[in-house]
């Protein structure tokens, strides 16, 4: 749930220019609300900040922050690095995902959340799916995906077979998302390189 400190009237102008409906707040503390069925999110303005809620908050958040005409980083670079990590304790057991989007300008967004109890490999896939969904919401055209699960990376590249039906289904979903980008790569990296996504996943587990 992004929280953005900004001039809320300027943000309202940006949202309106993007075709997002602005309406009155629900309480005395809310300056206004903005959203639509298409965005699957709502931006709620308070004094000096906006909270974006919903299942897909990042496109609205990108407009509020004025990240660029296409919803990307605003740096003239449509490429983003997508770090992902899934964690499962007891395998299968309590599970969570973590992800980070990074451009040459720095971190664009990051998050972690609990998911249903599952295996580590399924959690890795869920994390990969989530980071690609968020990258798509931001409007990036090129994704360089990085994770510390060699198995998942090689399955996505087609170097390993996927024998388990649940993992095959998730691999199909990953490729559906990747097909939405102009270019993509996926590579295995050491855990030390993926430490921020790993931290987001473990923080979500610890917050249980």
Image (tube, rainbow, N blue to C red):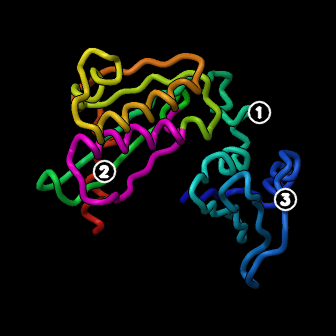
Mark 3 or 1 closer to N-term? 3
* Mark 1: secondary structure: loop
State the residue in front, 83 or 155. Answer: 155
In magenta segment, residue 94: no
Instruction: Check disc 2 and report the residue beneath it.
Output: 201
Q: Is residue 125 above or below residue 179?
A: below
Which label was assigned to residue 69? 1
Label 3: how many Cα within 10 Å (few below 14, some 14–19, many 20+): some
Give me the C-alpha separation between circle 3 and circle 2.
34 Å
Give me the residue at 83% from left, 45% from top. 18
Q: Position of residue 53 (x, y in %)?
A: 61, 62
Please give left or right for residue 25 compared with residue 160 in the image: right
Which label was assigned to residue 21? 3
Give me the residue at 70% from left, 67% from top. 44
Give me the residue at 46% from left, 39% from top. 131
Label 1: how many Cα within 10 Å (few below 14, some 14–19, many 20+): few
Q: Which residues are magenta?
A: 106-134
């Amino acid at each position: 749930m992004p929280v953005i400190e900004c001039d809320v009237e300027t943000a309202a102008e940006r949202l309106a220019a993007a075709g997002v409906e602005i309406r009155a707040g629900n309480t005395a503390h809310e300056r206004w609300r903005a959203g639509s069925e298409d965005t699957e999110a709502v931006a709620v303005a308070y004094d000096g900040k906006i909270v974006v809620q919903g299942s897909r908050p990042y496109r609205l958040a990108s407009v509020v922050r004025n990240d660029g005409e296409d919803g990307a980083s605003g740096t003239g670079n449509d490429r983003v690095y997508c770090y992902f990590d899934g964690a499962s304790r007891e395998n299968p057991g309590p599970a969570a995902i973590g992800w980070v989007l990074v451009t040459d300008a720095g971190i664009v967004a990051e998050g972690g959340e609990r998911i249903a109890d599952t295996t580590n490999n399924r959690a890795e896939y869920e994390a990969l799916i989530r980071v690609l969904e968020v990258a798509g919401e931001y409007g990036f055209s090129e994704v360089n995906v990085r994770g510390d699960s060699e198995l998942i990376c090689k399955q996505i590249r087609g170097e390993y077979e996927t024998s388990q039906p649940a993992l095959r289904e998730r691999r199909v979903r990953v490729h559906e998302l990747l097909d939405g980008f102009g270019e993509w790569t996926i590579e295995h990296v050491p855990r030390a390189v993926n430490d921020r996504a790993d931290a987001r996943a473990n923080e979500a587990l610890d917050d249980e």
